[in-house]
């Protein structure tokens, strides 16, 4: 408690009713949540298992958990839930799936799986082109986030296009059910729906979660809002913290107005505002405040800091993207050497993942260790998708998507016509492809060799399943990889032996994560739930974090940086069309981009450097770029421009970068 200011302490100690902490960036909102969890456990005697804190990203959840653990002694924190909304939803579904007529071992479809399913349904049932799948998937996801069910969507449809979407939604939900599968949005939607339908189950969960704390509340969507409201009911056990200026997920259905709704839902809501920022220097804070002042405001927040004026904010104009990435790399090398600091003190933030590619190359060229968050996902890799499909099929035979993915990986000579017959039979009988394999025989116009192969396949997998449940699953998953000669398959399908080895290494990372999950007593995951949880990536990311040395430059999108802080921040690509993004300019949604810019600026503790390019390659051609309007909105007295209006010649700039680098290399060689 000693480190808290009066208002924070007030927020931590207030347990008599629902509480909202509404405050700007870096004012200690997340700190209030972590301190409050410790307070509830240690001072109010609420057992940790009755307390749950939710946030949006795995990384934020991990950081929060670490902060709480460091505040608690011994096993006081045992059973505490600190997770993402999705993980909380999964916890609920793992226990209540039967009430929703799901079977155990349900699969979780990622966006790619979901899109493939929607595409198939469109082609089969609506005579529509599969290329609409993307659009329809987005619409379905929006409906789910808005807590709109398929039948409601159908009733609301006004145009033939709406109707097509709504019918696809209906078919999609029943196909998911048939596959014993659900998608990411269902992890929130289904628990909320269940709580609506089953007061008895809701009661049970209200009894379990007696105190709920929500971070980044401004980014909750309607389904999440509904879930929170249900869980809390009329009780007092709710603390939410948020900042309307940091609402950056409207495109994913977030409703910042949920903040205002709290006042209506809980007439006795207490609101605490925090104004002291403990993260950034005055100049960085002023920059953030000045930019965000251009957005319409309901509540003005006057953030101040005692951390000193700090350095001016540097704005660097670069010739092109290549020069920009090179410059950032040399800046980091230079600064790190001069300040004798760590790589981990630097973060490079950007609007879109595509901006990371060139950056990675430059960092590699300079041998700067870095960690890329998000981006090309581990779970998007073919080798991981293959093995995950096997695992999914082991726990859920109805998962036709998984079946189709691996039935011929490696080649089992089960041809297209056999698969088509299987598909027809399965549809007629309303059974899974896997069951069709077991049932179909010569009388169904399959030839003898096809029947033999199908039987061999299911017999082998049945035996594997039995052993995974009855014996050590990890040993048996390793056995699976060797039974199918997976390394050999990778060799045949990779450009070199080294690539195949790397890919096989990824499979081993996956298996190791699963192993750790099964060994983690606190989580109490069994084989089935560990596999479904794997899809949520949480543990895998944690393991990667642990394995890689933490001294790395952090690369991530502005969205992913929310809630985090770094001593030195670079925001690259400060151009019209990138930040603000062209789509937002076209749709008149620049306010949300400004909030994103505010989030970026407020990640910085000590220095902030922004860069933009004079030219950038766009659709294969070099085009002129215009500096972001947000640069003009910054407090000009606190900026140090470089390269603009001939103040510094861009070519010289480049040369300077090179000179710094040469100097550094010489220095390093001399050490
Ligand atoms: P954001 O809006 O970016 O999520 P936040 O409001 O959640 O920010 P925190 O991350 O909780 O802010 O806190 C910002 C920094 O300030 C952290 O490093 C935290 O440890 C520190 N901090 C918070 N409160 C205090 C305090 N009373 N005294 C000293 N440091 C504090
Ligand atoms: Mg926070």
Image (cartoon, rainbow, N blue to C red):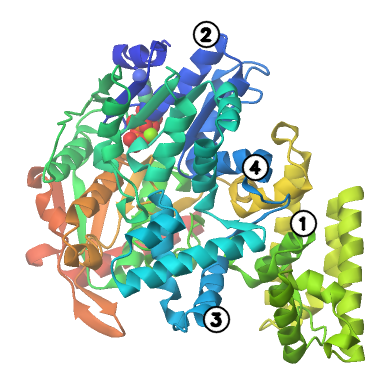
User: Which sits earlier in the primary sequence, circle 2 or circle 3?
Assistant: 2
Distance of label 1 from label 3 (alpha carbons): 27 Å
Q: For ligand 2, which image quadrant applies?
A: top left
Left or right, 207 with reference to 485 = left
Q: Report how far apart the C-alphas of labels 1 and 2 lie in the structure.
A: 42 Å
What residue does disc 2 label?
Answer: 44
Q: Is residue 582 above or below residue 286?
A: below
- Separation (CA) of disc 2 from disc 3: 58 Å
Which secondary structure lies at badge 4?
helix
Q: Secondary structure at mark 1?
A: helix
Mark 3 beta carbon near ligand 1 (under 8 Å): no
Disc 2 secondary structure class: loop
Would you name the residue on which mark 1 appears?
395
Residue at image mark 3: 124
Instruction: Find residue 302 and report its horizontal and vertical position in percent.
Output: 16, 28
Looking at the image, is mark 4 or mark 2 earlier in the sequence?
Answer: 2
* Image point (22%, 62%), residue name: 584
Q: Are circles 1 and 3 on residues that touch, CB within 8 Å?
A: no
State how far apart marks 4 and 1 are (Cα). Answer: 19 Å
Q: Nearer the viewer, mark 2 or mark 3?
A: 3
The answer to whether mark 2 and mark 3 are in CB contact below 8 A is no
- Callout 1: few (<14), some (14-19), or many (20+) C-alpha neighbours within 10 Å? many
Q: Earlier in the sequence, mark 1 or mark 3?
A: 3
Mark sitting on residue 99: 4
Identify which residue, 278 or 87, lies in the foreground: 87
- The quarter of the picture where residue 573 lies is bottom left
- Mark closer to the chain start, 1 or 2: 2
Residue 202: % across, % down? 55, 30
């Amino acid at each position: 408690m000693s480190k808290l200011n009066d208002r924070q302490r007030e927020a931590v100690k207030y347990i008599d009713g629902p509480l909202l902490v509404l405050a700007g960036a870096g004012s200690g909102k997340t700190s209030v949540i972590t301190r409050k969890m410790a307070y509830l456990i240690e001072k109010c005697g609420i057992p940790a298992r009755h307390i749950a804190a939710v946030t949006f990203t795995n990384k934020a959840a991990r950081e929060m958990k670490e902060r709480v653990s460091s505040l608690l002694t011994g096993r006081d924190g045992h059973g505490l839930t600190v997770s993402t909304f999705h993980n909380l939803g999964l916890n609920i579904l793992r226990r209540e799936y039967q009430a929703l007529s799901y079977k155990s071992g349900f699969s979780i479809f990622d966006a790619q799986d979901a899109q493939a399913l929607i595409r198939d349904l469109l082609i089969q049932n609506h005579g529509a082109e599969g290329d609409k799948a993307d659009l329809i998937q987005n619409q379905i996801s929006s409906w789910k986030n808005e807590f709109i069910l398929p039948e409601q969507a159908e009733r609301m449809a006004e145009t033939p296009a709406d109707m097509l979407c709504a019918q696809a939604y209906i078919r999609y939900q029943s196909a998911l059910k048939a596959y014993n599968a659900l998608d990411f949005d269902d992890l929130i939607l289904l628990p909320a729906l269940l709580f609506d339908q089953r007061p008895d189950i809701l009661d049970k969960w209200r009894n379990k979660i007696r105190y709920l704390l929500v971070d980044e509340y401004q980014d909750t969507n309607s389904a999440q809002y509904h879930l929170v409201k249900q869980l809390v009911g009329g009780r007092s056990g709710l603390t939410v913290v948020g900042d309307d200026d940091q609402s950056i997920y409207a495109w994913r259905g977030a409703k910042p107005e949920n903040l205002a709704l709290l006042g209506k839902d809980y007439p006795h809501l207490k609101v605490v505002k925090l104004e002291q920022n403990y993260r950034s220097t005055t100049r960085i804070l002023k920059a953030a405040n000045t930019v965000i002042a251009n957005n319409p405001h309901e509540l003005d927040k006057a953030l101040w800091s005692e951390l000193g004026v700090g350095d001016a904010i540097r704005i660097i104009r670069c010739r092109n993207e290549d020069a920009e990435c090179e410059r950032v790399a040399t800046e980091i090398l230079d600064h790190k050497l001069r300040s004798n600091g760590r790589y981990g003190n630097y973060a490079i933030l950007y609007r879109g993942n595509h901006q990371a590619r060139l950056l990675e190359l430059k960092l590699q060229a300079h041998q700067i260790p870095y960690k890329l968050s998000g981006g090309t996902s581990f779970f998007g890799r073919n080798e991981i998708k293959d093995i995950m499909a096997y695992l999914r099929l082991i726990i859920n035979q109805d998962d036709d998507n998984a079946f189709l993915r691996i039935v011929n990986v490696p080649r089992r000579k089960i041809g297209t016509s056999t698969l088509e017959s299987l598909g027809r039979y399965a549809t007629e009988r309303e059974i899974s492809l896997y069951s069709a394999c077991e049932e179909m025989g010569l009388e169904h116009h399959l030839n003898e060799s096809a029947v033999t192969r199908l039987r061999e396949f299911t017999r082998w997998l049945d035996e594997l399943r039995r052993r995974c449940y009855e014996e050590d699953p990890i040993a048996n998953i390793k056995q699976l990889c060797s039974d199918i000669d997976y390394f050999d398959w990778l060799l045949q399908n990779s450009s070199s032996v080294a690539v195949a080895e790397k890919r096989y290494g990824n499979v081993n990372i996956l298996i190791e994560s699963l192993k750790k999950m099964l060994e983690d007593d606190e989580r109490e995951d069994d084989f089935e739930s560990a596999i479904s949880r794997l899809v949520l990536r949480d543990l895998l990311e944690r393991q990667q974090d642990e394995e890689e040395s933490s001294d790395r430059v952090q690369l991530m999108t502005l969205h992913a940086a929310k809630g985090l802080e770094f001593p030195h921040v670079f925001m690259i690509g400060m151009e019209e069309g990138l930040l603000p993004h062209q789509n937002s300019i076209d749709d008149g949604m620049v306010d949300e981009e400004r909030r994103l810019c505010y989030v970026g600026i407020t990640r910085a503790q000590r220095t902030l450097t922004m860069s933009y390019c004079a030219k950038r390659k766009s659709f294969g051609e070099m085009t002129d770029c215009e500096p972001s309007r947000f640069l003009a909105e910054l407090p000009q007295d606190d900026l140090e421009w470089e390269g603009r209006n001939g103040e510094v010649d861009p070519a010289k700039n480049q040369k300077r970068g090179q000179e710094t680098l040469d100097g550094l290399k010489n220095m390093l060689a001399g050490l």
